[in-house]
Amino acid sequence: MSFENLSRDQIQTLLDEQRAHYRELQDSGLKLDLTRGKPSPEQLDLSLPLLALPGDDFTDSHGTDTRNYGGLNGLPELREIFAPILQVPLEQIVAGDNASLAMMHDNLVFSLLHGTVDSPRPWVAEESVKFICPVPGYDRHFALTEEYGIEMIPVDLLADGPDMNAVRALVEDPTVKGMWLVPTYGNPSGAVVSEAVAAELAGLETAAPDFRIFWDNAYAVHHLTDEQTKTADIIGLCAASDHPHRAITFASTSKITFAGSGVCFLASSPDNVAWYLKHLGKRTIGPDKVNQLRHARFLQDTEGVMALMTRHRQILAPKFEQVVTILRERLASYAVAEWTEPKGGYFVSLDVVDGTASRVIELAREAGVAMTPAGAAFPYGHDPRDRNIRIAPSYPSSAELATAIEVLATCVLLAAAEQSLA
Ligand code: PLP
């Protein structure tokens, strides 16, 4: 990407103009934050009735007093609501507390310390353990993997899933034990893993007998358009390919109800669920069933989840539109950036001129706009081309968002012009 059709003088003029505009923005004393994909207060208000539930009727439909200990796999009536979304019968689902990230953490740690149902030995007893990390990806996946000394191998995430040529070669190494994947509306690119790529992943012959796909379907029902993408049924595909334990699906209501007080889910083969519960049972006597009951009563059924997601979409879609419109107006004619126009999820992924993402983020910070650090969407925080920037449009008000993207676009042009004239 470059200022393809501009002379040096024209780029200098553009730099001067953008510097003047930048100073004006800087002088306006902004304090805006586009760092994390959090629901806005308006979105959280959609689930306000949760706080009045379950009232003094705290017994579930099976007669369980939800205030007490027990019920490690979670309330059946809540699992039933999410079974069509997770594409498995409720017996193959565990409903937990407020963070699917904690379930992912436990699955990694249990695999390291105990080995999985088809591991020859605990993963820590291996010479080394490696994970395939499609990029750009979710920074917390990478932070978690790094925390436990698992080596991360980046692979490009294309529009229909990870670069399978790279994946095919990597799984020939027996120390490659697994991979991360956000199948529907990836964080941050919005990429959707196609049925064909999912089927190939399920069928791959891997050198590790216990290869795992951590299928993090955090945005399964988070559509932004009428095109309601259906996630490939990875657990079914793995079972059909004779690798029944390969995929573990994770999901949560963090961006359906309350990000801090939702419920989370794990779905996998019956053996994997039994394995997970065996180890989980040492860590806890049971989940917060009162919260699970209030969720089941509030959401009512799968249609109730979808209806709530339509209301989220009404709030979110205009914000995404706003981001894309401003980027288009400010940047399209200069060919200095490319961005995604996702059909769901929580992010827009912006690629700027190679070598300028850190500078753009620095300039934005100095003008009062906090962005996720450059490189965050890559293992070890290292974007080899220093070009990717994650935009999280959900939290700010529409007016704040417009200003923040205006600042960002100015910084993209400034950094590109600086580099071009350097
Ligand atoms: N997975 C992905 C891909 C996410 O983007 C996020 C939050 O941003 C999470 C998981 C966090 O999920 P939870 O709140 O259930 O821990």
Image (cartoon, rainbow, N blue to C red):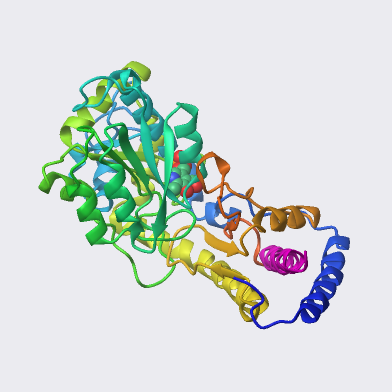
Picture quadrant where residue 229 is located: bottom left
Which quadrant of the figure contains the C terminus?
A: bottom right
Vertical order, 336 against 73 (above or below): below
Which quadrant of the figure contains the N terminus?
A: bottom right
Q: Is residue 52 left or right of residue 250?
A: right
Magenta span has 262?
no
What residue is shown at x 11% (from left), y 48% (from top)?
A: 240
| Residue closer to the observer: 54 or 222 | 222
Predominant secondary structure in magenta?
helix
> What is the count of numbered marks?
0
Vertical order, 306 against 175 (above or below): below
Q: Residue 199: x, y in percent?
A: 20, 55
Q: Is residue 31 left or right of residue 258?
A: right
Vertical order, 157 against 62 (above or below): below
Q: Residue 253: x, y in percent?
A: 41, 46
What residue is shown at x 46% (from left), y 40% (from top)?
A: 141
What residue is shown at x 54% (from left), y 39% (from top)?
A: 380
Q: Residue 246: x, y in percent?
A: 22, 39
Magenta residues, start to end? 399-422
